[in-house]
Image: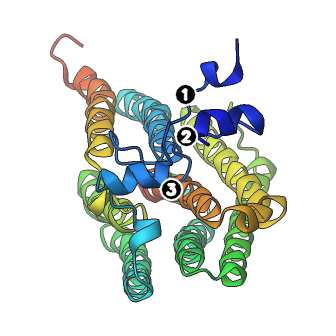
Amino acid sequence: MSEHAIIDVPPHSPADEAEHAGIHDPNLHHSPEEIKREVRVYLIVFFALSALTAVTVASFYALKSYPVSVAIGVALAIALVKGSLVAGYFMHLLSEKKLIYGVLILTVFFFFVLIWAPWAHHHSPFN
Amino acid sequence: MDAHAHAGEHEIEIPYAIYPRPDTGLYNGKLGIWLFLASEVMLFGALFSSYILLRTGAVNWPRGYTFLNIPLATANTFILIASSVTVVLAWANLRLGNLKLGRIFIAITILCALLFLVNKGIEYHHEFVEGRSPSTNNFMALYFTLTGLHGLHVIGGVIVFAYFLGPGAKMWHEDRNRYTNRIEIAGLYWHFVDLVWIFLFPTLYLL
């Protein structure tokens, strides 16, 4: 069997195909000004993440006398905001393709099943 | 000469390594890394699930802040956040055509990762000196499993970035778009490592 029978090489240049399909590739089509603007956003997100880390530790000490459920709620809420900033801006999920959103929706669903299952087990009346 | 004939004569061209596929809108490496990261979410998700199961079922649960080193862990959080920024700055500079600055930011990322590992080593050393090991209790077993697995991911990132800083950088001279894409997907992996730590830090050290 010949080599190109095993691996499907596109008959046309991928660049041509992408252009003809009207696909936008950020690596290839962003202007230097747009990229520099992105860099400014990255730096703002960096400062926001640093500030939120400080808030996480400060709130831990401030909430020491409160029930642990309050501390857990606050710490996880801050972690969720930080995680959203990383995923949204650094991993550029705010402007991704639908296929990736589809993959992530499935992933998040099963992740919450994993988190919910032990909690539900603990609170089950049959436990 | 069409691509089939070209591939047969010289070398096999990997399709959609640089440009996006018309049907997915993504180049293959990017879709591949997201599928890998989805599996990683389930891997760490299973360990977080174990944490919840063991903690909710325990009569007494050790509180990490009473004996773990919070200042060092906080410093490590800042270090990982900084390294996430240097990765996107490396990617941005490569997109601007500046290999020199791109490599400098990749090198800073590696330094941050190594600093993180050194701090983690100091913490582990302290725990063992104090007589706390994975067999001490369920909390310590989870602490070492979660941070150990995370540490292995940091080491994996160091290896990948060191490759692209060193021998892998010659790809830039052959095909700069492909090299830039490689840094983008290595960066996506690295941001995920940062993301995991963002949740590990409060879970193990503060709560």
In screen coordinates, is B60 left or right of B116? left
Could you say whether the residue bearing mark 1 is in a helix, strand or loop? loop
- Same subunit, labels 2 and 3: the answer reads yes
The scheme the figure's colours follow is rainbow
Distance from Cα at disc 1 to Cα at disc 3: 27 Å
Question: Disc 2 marks which amino acid?
Answer: Pro
In the picture shown, does residue B34 fall above or below A61? above
| Residue topped by disc 3 | B188
Distance from Cα at disc 2 to Cα at disc 1: 8 Å
At which x and y percent is residue B171? 74, 60
| Chain letter belonging to callout 2 | B
Check disc 2: other Cα within 10 Å, few if <14, some if 14-19, many if 20+.
some
Question: Disc 1 marks which amino acid?
Answer: Asp
| Chain letter belonging to callout 1 | A
Could you say whether the residue bearing mark 3 is in a helix, strand or loop? helix
In which quarter of the view is residue B53 placed?
Answer: top left
